[in-house]
Amino acid sequence: MKIGIIVAMDKEFKQLKTLLGAYRTEHRNHKDFILGEIGNNAVVMQQCGIGKVNSAIGAVEMIDNYHPDLIISTGVAGGADVSLNVTEVVVGTEYVYHDAYCGSECAYGQILGMPPSFPAPSQLVELALAVNGPDVPKIHSGQIVSGEWFVDSREKMQTILNRFPHAMAVDMESCSIAQTCFIYRTPFISFRIISDVPLKDHKAAQYFDFWNRMAEGSFNVTRKFLINL
């Protein structure tokens, strides 16, 4: 298979590239793509930038230039569920915008003309949950909600949970990539490493400490998932 992997930030991209042995770089439409292999899969990696617009553009460029069989979004997210711990991983079962409102005829978070949420293929979620090993963190599955907020307070997280009580993790890219993949009929799944749990945190202290101790094996779930495909 050919797999496209998208991350938002430079810190994430540097870690992600360690999953590859040899690789080469291609420059397409102002974006760099890293090409290599993991297991039996050809892999194309890209750093898209933070937020919904950057990630949607990144997904379109990935699809137009490389036609992947599957797109994976990975990187960090805030934990919405207080049962989560820092460095654990959430695999998304569905993706929703937490900051979209198109009127009373739509569900909150729904873009007019689009479904209320974008589900991940169940077989991919099951494959992700089957990943295990001594170097793999605990893996959870659930709803990932996305929006243009950096959730750095308990109050912000509680506002999101008031609308989406089943949210497991919050990020700024998963749903926009999911929507793009829905339009382009490309399978999509997101893995999110929990950097902080705002309802158990104070002034984003967990988040900033996370980057100081983020292990080189943080993307092992992604690596083993690809090997098992």
Image (cartoon, grey):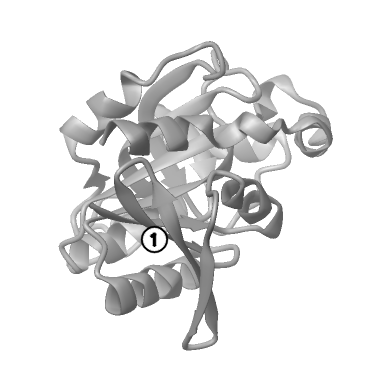
123 vs 3, nearest the viewer:
3
Point out the residue furthest to the bottom here. 29
- The residue drawn where x is 38% and y is 53% is 175
Residue 185 position (above or below residue 85): below
Which of the pair 181/229 is nearer the observer?
A: 229
- Is residue 153 found left or right of 35 in the rendered image? right
Q: Dividing the image into 4 quarters, which one contains the C terminus?
A: top left
Image location of residue 91, percent across then percent down:
39, 32
User: Is 6 positioned to the left or the right of 207 in the image?
Assistant: left
> In front here: 48 or 132?
132
Q: Residue furthest front?
A: 22
Is residue 111 something one can see in this rendering? no
Please count the marks in the image.
Answer: 1
- Mark 1, secondary structure of its residue: helix
Residue at numbered disc 1: 176
Task: Give the quadrant of residue 155.
Answer: top right
List x then y, in percent, for residue 151.
65, 44
Q: Amino acid at mark 1?
A: Ser
Mark 1 surroundings within 10 Å by alpha-carbon count, few (fewer than 14), some (14 through 19), many (20 or more): many
Residue pictured at 52% horizontal, 31% vertical: 220
